[in-house]
Image (cartoon, grey):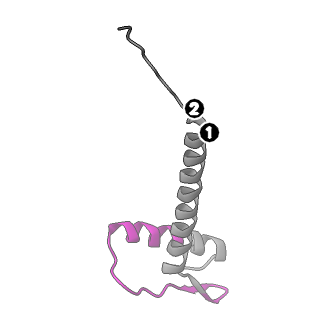
Amino acid sequence: MDKVELSAWKDISAEKQRALAEQQYKEEIIEQQTAALAEMSTPLLTISDTTVVMPLVGTVDSRRVAQLMDTLLQGVSASRASM
């Protein structure tokens, strides 16, 4: 009896490319949503030409402190508010 070997393969390159593109798209959306959420969680309100106010609601951890400082320094610089 002779041995017969059968093999089959399927090119999944296109499927992998599509999955990779979808993953990258999802990551971009998450980054955009994270940036939007960060902006909303640290609003800087201009009261007058030289005064800005930043209301704080919620917990303030080290990551949020860094975000608060960045937003505050940029806002003070942009509005020329005094500290």
79 left or right of 60? right
Q: Would residue 4 be counted in the magenta stretch?
A: no
Check whether the beta carbons of the residues at disc 2 and disc 1 lie within 8 A of each other: yes
Residue at the bottom extreme, as displayed: 47
Depth order, front residue of 7/73: 7
- Quarter assignment of residue 28: bottom right
Q: Tell me: residue 25, above or below residue 1.
A: below
Residue span colored magenta: 46-73
| Quarter of the image where the N terminus is located | top left
Residue at 58%, 53% in the rendered image: 22
Depth order, front residue of 30/17: 17
Residue 73 seen anywhere in this rendered image of the structure:
no
Number of marks drawn: 2
- Report the disc number at residue 68: none
- Report the disc number at residue 11: 2
Q: CA distance from mark 2 to mark 1?
A: 8 Å
- Quarter assignment of residue 33: bottom right
Q: Locate residue 4, reporting x and y percent.
A: 42, 14
Q: Tell me: residue 56, above or below residue 30.
A: below
Task: Give amino acid for label 1.
Answer: Ala
Residue at 65%, 77% in the rendered image: 79
Q: Secondary structure at mark 1?
A: helix
Residue at the top extreme, as displayed: 2
